[in-house]
Image (cartoon, rainbow, N blue to C red):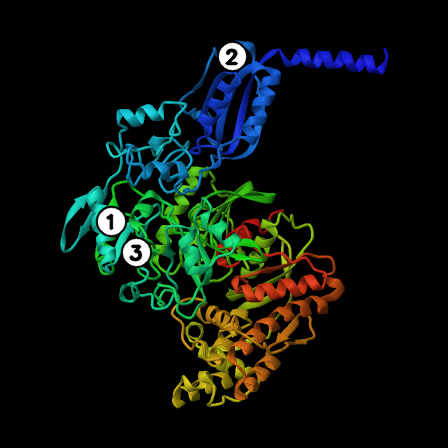
Amino acid sequence: MHDHARDSVDADRMRAAGTVSVCQRLAVRGIVQGVGFRPFVYALARRHGLAGRVCNVDGGVSIEVSGPLRTLEVFRVGLEHEAPPLARIESIATEVLPTASWPADGFEIVASDPRSAGAVSLVSPDISLCDACRGELHDPSDRRHLYPFINCTDCGPRFTIVTGTPYDRPLTTMAGFAMCSACRAEYEDPTSRRFHAQPIACPDCGPRLTWWSADARTVTGTAALDAARTALSSGRIVAVKGLGGFHLACDAANDASVRVLRSRKGRPHKPLAVMVKDLETARRLTVLGSREAEALGARERPIVLVEARPDTELSPLLAPGQQTLGLMLPYTPLHELLLGDRPLVMTSGNLSDEPIVKDDDEARDRLSGIADGFLGHDRPIHTVCDDSVVRVAHGRTVFIRRSRGFAPAPVDLPRSVPPTLAVGGELKSVFCLARTRRAFLSQHIGDMADLETLEAFERAYDLLRGVFRIEPERLVCDLHPGYLSSRWAREHGAAAGLPVVEMQHHHAHVAALLAEHGLDGSRPMLGFAFDGTGYGADGSVWGGEALLADYRGFERVAHLRVVPLPGGDRAVRQPARLALAHLHAAGLPWDAALPCVRFFSESTLGVLRTQLDRGLATVPSSSMGRLFDAVASLLGVRQEISYEGQAAIELEALAASACAPRVYRFELAPGPPVVLDPGPVLAALVDDLRRGVARADIGEGFHRAVGQAVVDVVARLGDAVRGLPVGLTGGVFQNLRLQGYAVELLQRAGQAPLWHRVVPANDGGLALGQAMIAVE
C-alpha cells in the first residue's frame, strides 16, 4: 500500500477510536483540596457531557469519568489549563477502568474516600479575600454585607484552621459551626462559588466578633467592630484576632499611640508593619515600583519592605533609623472592615521574643498589659502563622520571612531524600519535613530561645507530621551544641532511636541555595555565606565564609580574618565592643574621637583592652555580620542594639544617601584558605573619619568594598572554581546594597551568581539545606 493511503487509513482508525466510549480514573496530586477543585471538575465534566464522580482522597483528588476518548482527552487538557487560581497540579495519573465499574449517567461530587491512607495531601496556605467576596462584603443587598468572615473556594482560611486531612469541614476548626439552610444550599450547589467551600459561613450560622475591654461592657457582632474602630480612632491600642494569631493595632499616624505600643510591647526600635487600605494609599506613603505593587497586591498579601516617602502623615517612630517601611494590604474581611481610611500599625500580638497569641482567653491573659481592648471571635485558630515579609531585589521578590500565604506549600527538591526532619537553627526558626522530592517548610516559629517557643515548634511539628504523614527516619540539626533546637533533636532522636546528623551552619546555607535552584549536587558550588553567627567546624564562630560545597560536604576555601570578640553574646548586643575588637586586631589606636571609644568609661576601656591583649573571655569570630556592626559603631550609627541586625540595617540606610562613595579594598592573604583582611579598609575608614569625610560616603564605600572582596576571592581561587556556580547566602545578603554590588561585579567578571528567592537568605532557609545534607 502506498504510504499516503496507509496514512489515510490510520487517520480514519484514529478518528473512529476517538468516538469510542471508555472509562478512566484520574488521580490528581498537588494542592487540589480546599481550592474549589472538585466543583471545577464537576463543571468541566458537565460542560463536556461526561459521566462520573469526583472526590477528595488522601494525597489529592480522584476522578472517575466516562465518555468518548477524544472528549476525555479534551477534558484532561482542561484540568491542566483551566484549574482554579489556588490549585497547583503536580501530576495526573490515568488508569483505564473495566466496563463493569463505569459510573451511571450524570456527574457528581461524592464524600471523601478514606481508602488511600498514607498518601500525602497538600494543604493550601491561607489566602486573602478575593474580589468577588469583597464585592459582596460591601453590597448592602447581599446577605453577607459587612460580615467579617465571608469567604469562598477562592479565598479565606485554610492552613490555620486545618486539623487533619483530607480537607473537609469536620477536619477544620469550622466543625463546630452547623450550616444554616441558606449556606447548606450554596455548599451543595455545584454552580455556586461556595460549593464545598469548607469555611462557608454567614451572620446566621458562622463565627461572631466579640469586643471586650476593662472600661466597657462586652459586645458582639457589628457593635464589637464599631467599638474597636472607636478605640483605634481615639488613640488606643487594640488586640485584633486575625487568621494566624493576634495583631496589636494602633493608629499609624499617632506618635503617642506608637510610642505607648513600643513601650508596652518591649520593642523600642524594631520596625512596625503598617496596613493600608489600597495601592493608592501605599503610593502616597512610599516609593512604590511596579514589582513592589505586584507583591503588595498578590493573593498571599505579605508585608513588603518599600522606600518610605518623607513628610507623610505617618509617625516617624514606625521605623527609626531606616528608609524603608513594611506595608501590607488587608487580607481578611475583618481587616478590611476595621481599617477604613486610616493606616494602622499591625504588628504581631506578643511581647518581644514570645510566641504569637492565638486564643481569646490567652490574649486577655498575656496581652492585657499591652492592649486597651480586644477584638476577638469564636472561630478557633488551630495553627499560629505570622505574616510573611518580602523585599524586591533586582526585579525579583525575595523572602525575609516565609510564613502566612506561603507555608506549608511544598518546595520541589532536585533529588530524592528519605523521610527527614530538619529542625533549622535558633534565630528565625523554621523546620522542614521532607520526603522523596518534596520539602514542607513550616511557618515562621520565631527565635528558639525559651520553652514557650519550643512548645510552639512542637505543636507545629505534630500538625505537619500528621497532615503530610511523614514519619522521619532521620533528624538533622545545627552543629551548635547550645541551640535549643539542636538539643531537642538529639534528645528526640535518642528517645526514638533515630540517627541525628549534625550540620555545619554555613554548609546548610549553601545547600539551601543549591536546592532551591534545582542543582543536584553533582558539581559543588562556591558559596559565600555571610551572616552574624554560626558554629564553625573548628569550634570558633564563623560568618564570613566562602565554601566549596555540595550536599555531601564542604571545603572552607576563604574566610574573613578571625577576630576575638570580648564578652561573647554581650559583644553582639554592643557593636561598640565589636568596633574596638576590630581596631585592636588591625593594630589601630582607640582614638578618643571615635564614637565607639567615647561610648565606654575609661575603666571599661581598660578592662576591654586587657581582655583583648590577653585573650580573656573572648570568642574568636570570622563573622561578616559582626564586621558590619563594627563599622556601624565606628560611624556613630549604633553602639547598642535592641534587635538582631539593627546596626547593619541602619548602616545600609545611611549608605543610601551617599554622594561621593569612598574606595576601599580588603587585603587577601594567601591560603589555603584565603583570608580576607579588613585591616586596610578599617585604617582608611578611620582616616576618612578624622578628615571629616561624610559618614554616608564612608558607609557606601564599605558596602562596595565587601562586594569587591567577593569578586577578588573568586579571582584568587582561579582554576579551582572555574565553571562552578557562585552563590550568595546568609543573612548579610539581605542587605540589598551589598547584594546588588556583589551581583553586578560578579556579572562583569563573567559569573552568573545565584541568590535566594524560594526561601530566605537568613536562617529561615537553613532547614531546607539541612534536609538535603548527607543524602546519598
Q: Give the labeled residue for mark 1.
A: 375
Q: Is residue 269 above or below residue 755?
A: below
Q: Is residue 73 above or below residue 32?
A: above
Q: Tell me the amino acid under the disc marked 3.
A: Leu
Q: Going from the N terminus, do you reach mark 1 or mark 2 first?
A: 2
The quarter of the displayed image where residue 79 is located: top right
Q: How many numbered marks have been drawn onto this rendered protein structure?
A: 3
Mark 1 and mark 2: span between their CA atoms? 54 Å
Q: Tell me if 377 is positioned left or right of 487 in this view.
A: left
Mark 2 and mark 3: span between their CA atoms? 57 Å
Mark 1 and mark 3: span between their CA atoms? 10 Å
Q: x, y (%) of residue 222? A: 22, 42
Q: Give the labeled residue for mark 2.
A: 101
Tell me the quarter of the image containing the N terminus. top right
Q: Going from the N terminus, do you reach mark 2 or mark 3 first?
A: 2
Q: Tell me the amino acid under the disc marked 2.
A: Ser
- The answer to whether marks 2 and 3 mark residues whose Cβ atoms lie closer than 8 Å is no
Q: x, y (%) of residue 441? A: 48, 47
The quarter of the displayed image where residue 530 is located: bottom right
Q: Give the labeled residue for mark 3.
A: 248
Q: Tell me the amino acid under the disc marked 1.
A: Leu
